[in-house]
Image: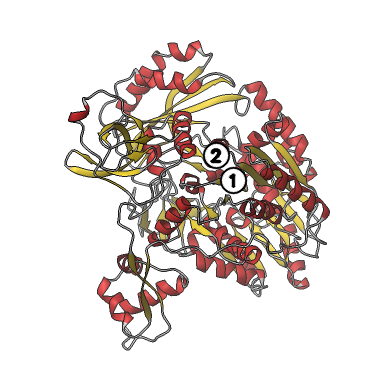
Amino acid sequence: MTRFHPPGAPVAVLTTQPLDRALDYRAPTGGVEDGAFVEVPLGPRKVLGVVWGEAAGDWPVEKLRPILRVLEVPAMGSPFRDFIERAAAYTLTPLPAMLRLGLRAPGLGEVPGKRRVYGLGTGTPDRATPARQKVIDALRDRPTDLFALSELADLAGVSTSVVKGLCASGAVLEQAMPRDADFPPLDPARAGKPLAPDQAEAADALRAEIATGDYGTTLLRGVTGSGKTEVYLEAVAECMARGRQALVLLPEIALTAEFLTRVQARFGARPAEWHSGVTQAERRRTWAKTAEGQARLIVGARSALFLPYRDLGLIVVDEEHDTSYKQEDGVLYSARDMAVLRASCEGAQVVLATATPSLESWANAELGKYKRLDLTSRFGEAVLPKLATIDMRDEAVAGGRWISPTLKRAVEARIIAGEQSLIFLNRRGYAPVTLCRACGQQVACHQCDARMVEHRFLKRLMCHQCGETAPMPEVCPSCGVEGKLAAVGPGVERMAEEVTALFPEARVAILSSDLFGSARALKAKVEEIASGGADIIVGTQLVAKGHNFPKLTLVGVIDADLGLQGSDLRAAERTFQLMRQVSGRAGRADKPGQALLQTYQPDHPVIRAILTGDEEAFLREEAAQRRAAGVPPYGRMAGIVISDPDAGVAFDVGNALARNTAGLDEIGAEVYGPAPAPIARIRGRHRVRLLVKAPRQAPIQPALAAWVAGIDLPRSTRLSIDIDPQSFL
């Protein structure tokens, strides 16, 4: 319940500073309510915070410093504050760090007013210079966006005077506009696409759930091409028609542009966006209008869960199985799980949409915690593709080549028929390993224990763990011998070379996230391919997510065994999901599709399950194995990573934890480790891992909190706890 605190009353204010608790202040003139965004003094600084309730009372009121001012934005509602507290407790994250996720709005403390913004104009520069051209190119990449002066200058890599110089000719448009202009209204009554009978039945079920006004979660499961998006957009329409806000989470920014086009066609205007690709001015606007309730539909990445919704009625998690919903840096959380938590706090509905559900969501549906809706056929005349394996043990493939003769013949047939083929390999770059043939050393990242990946198109080596890049060396960094560095294994760029050599007359397009400098460039390439601008697509998992290529009738998977190695407990599940998703790109229009999986293990249970398409049988078998092992979703797990510049210090901390497990023993938990992490050094810090496994109902969070609280960490040491880890690197 929201309380009002009269002037001078003691109140607790939670800031985003790294403190262990809220601080007490005096309410300002005019008083203040719970959830108000305020500016308070902290030492010599002024910081932002949120009124979190009554003061702890540790200090006399007369000694408390007063709140400096209350920001002119709507207060944070009690459901949002409840979500922040529960999310912090679940993930074992300090409250200030969790609150920081909800205050990611640039200029939040500024007084509302006019702002000057800059966008693409219609004029021509009176004088052409390289610097001016950089500005024009940056704006052409994002023609509908408006930028602050410094933001546009930084984006183009020029000084602000260059931008101002372009305004006189009209090449850059300068205008004053309200700091937070309203978003155009969306029309939920606007007619959507005609629905097939099973789509209409699913849409009616979702509308009925939203009409209750209560919390609930529904797993919307449909084969690729079955029209899940159109179904959940009907749920969005129902939510908005009832005056509530809706959030649609997407796993990749690359999918946003195509999805926004569909939303605009459905509701007559573009929704608000929240992801790393939007400008700072737009982030501020989206945050403010979400808080006011004026932004009715928000489309965003996982961090959009932490916007200050006024009345959130629906959260859609599209491709709910996708691993990119797990935040692996900073605050560690699963956006899918946090979506369910936020909805339970807000009295909202959740729709988990996917063609290949995660075992966690499937198990919750089996237990009756989630409702389940199935779309079993493709929309319109499209049919599911036929799947088959190519046994690579029987194929004569030349050294340094990876496309089998069988797959080559299938691609040739599609080219003759005027249809498209996809060659799929889930490896970015040119080659995963660069080896010196003189000394045998692999070129490694100097900051990590990871190999550098050659990106030949960029003429760089790149570490996929820390992002470090370096130019391609002429000599071996280990032995200094020149001309002996060799690429080992294929990446998507190397596959493109092979495809071009095998099919010299074909038009080849590459889809990989690192090859596009902007979302607009990627969108343009996808549209070009969809309109028939390529005969063969060579792509990574980027192409498996939501893109629709009507002329694509063949998918060739180069290495179906790639994800089956290693000790990741989800390896089989992820391989099944990825293979089914990428296979589903074929035959989405009127022509039938085929998927061919190159494998050295055609009798592997996962490969057999992919071919049969009996997903229920696969999930039941996977569930039985997980249940027997006591691992998620039938047990609890937590990963502890200790890092330090000194490996010995990290191991000392790990050993101290391993010797003192009394509290964990009491809840039936087991501790494994310490052991070096599979990638034992990242960004110069040595990493040691422990793994905690506990029964499903065990109170693992308080036990873990008490366990690590008993250790005094050296100043140089960092310790992170990952509840329900997705990665074990």
In the visual, does 300 lie left or right of 63? right
Q: Is residue 560 visible?
A: no
Circle 2: element type = helix
Circles 2 and 1: CB distance less than 8 Å?
yes
Vertical order, 44 against 194 (above or below): above
Neighbour tally class for label 2: few under 14, some 14-19, many 20 plus, Cα within 10 Å: many
Name the kind of residue labelled 1 in the image.
Gly
**Closer to the camera in the image, 638 or 491:** 638
Q: What colour scheme was applied to this rendering of the protein?
A: secondary structure
Residue at image x 37%, y 42%? 36
Between 593 and 720, the one nearer to me in the picture: 720
Q: Nearer the viewer, residue 34 or 186?
A: 34
Q: Earlier in the sequence, mark 2 or mark 1?
A: 1
Q: Is residue 229 left or right of residue 569?
A: right
Report how far apart the C-alphas of labels 2 and 1 lie in the structure. Answer: 7 Å
Q: Which residue is mark 1?
A: 313
> Could you say which disc has been placed on residue 42 in the image?
none
Q: Is residue 273 above or below residue 132?
A: above
Q: Give whichever of 534, 3 is nearer the camera.
A: 3
Q: Disc count in the image?
A: 2
Query: Would you call the spot at circle 1 few (<14 residues within 10 Å), some (14-19), or many (20 or more)?
Result: many
Q: Position of residue 442 (x, y in %)?
A: 42, 47
Which amino acid is tagged 2? Glu
Q: Picture coordinates of residue 26 (x, y %)?
A: 25, 35
* Residue 482 visible, this angle: yes
Q: Which secondary structure, mark 1?
A: strand
Q: Is residue 397 above or below residue 89?
A: below
Which residue is at a point 38% across and 49% down the rendered structure image? Answer: 104
Lateral position of residue 179 relative to residue 526, left or right: left
On residue 346, the disc is 2
**Looking at the picture, how far across and down is residue 502, in whole percent?**
65, 67
